[in-house]
Image (cartoon, grey):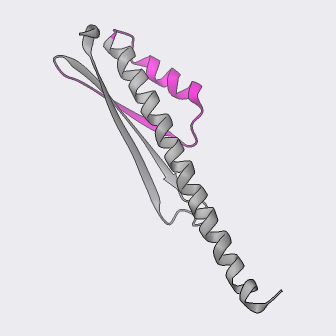
Amino acid sequence: MTAEFAIVLPAVILVLGVALSVLAIQTSRIGLVGLAAESARALARGEPESLIQQLLQGVGLDGEVSSKTSYSDLSVCVELAQINHIRGLGDLFPIEVKEIQCARKGGL
């Protein structure tokens, strides 16, 4: 093993680890999109708000997800937010992933 290889290998492993963590965060965001849309549609149909908490527990996303619901005249919006961290860097750079999805009330 050459000295150059021994110096470059840890940097390559760190970059790969960060890239995989960013990919995991994006995958988590895709899960939030589906969950927020499903929650908004359910609330627009008249389901109780406790359904959102049941959906959050059933999905199994990493970390804690906070939810906020807002109502307007014709629509219901659900905002889901989650704090993620890049593995390998610890808690230095928290990244908040937030998704808002809306649905029209009563299927209009």
Which one is nearer the viewer's eye here, 70 or 16?
16
Q: Quadrant of the N terminus?
A: bottom right
Give the side of residue 93 with respect to residue 59, left or right.
left
Q: Is residue 42 above or below residue 18?
A: above
Give the side of residue 60 with respect to residue 97, left or right.
right
Q: Quadrant of the C terminus?
A: top left
Residue at far right of view: 1
Q: Is residue 5 above or below residue 36?
A: below
Q: Determine if the magenta segment contains residue 14.
A: no
**Going 50% across and 35% down the picture, which residue do you hit?**
31
Which one is nearer the viewer's eye here, 39 or 50?
39
Give the side of residue 27 with respect to residue 80, left or right.
right
**Going 39% across and 10% down the picture, which residue do you hit?**
47
State the image quarter where residue 9 is shown. Answer: bottom right
State the image quarter where residue 105 is shown. Answer: top left
**Residue 102, horizontal then vertical, whole percent:** 29, 26
**Residue 93, horizontal then vertical, whole percent:** 47, 63
Q: Is residue 106 above or below residue 92?
A: above
**Going 46% across and 28% down the picture, which residue do you hit?**
35
**Residue 73, horizontal then vertical, whole percent:** 16, 17
Give the side of residue 105 with respect to residue 17, left or right.
left
Residue at far left of view: 73
Which one is nearer the viewer's eye here, 24 or 76?
24
**Residue bounds of the magenta highlight:** 45-72
**Residue 88, horizontal then vertical, whole percent:** 62, 65
Q: Determine if the magenta segment contains residue 62.
A: yes
- Counting every numbered tag in the picture gives 0
**Going 23% across and 19% down the picture, which residue do you hit?**
75
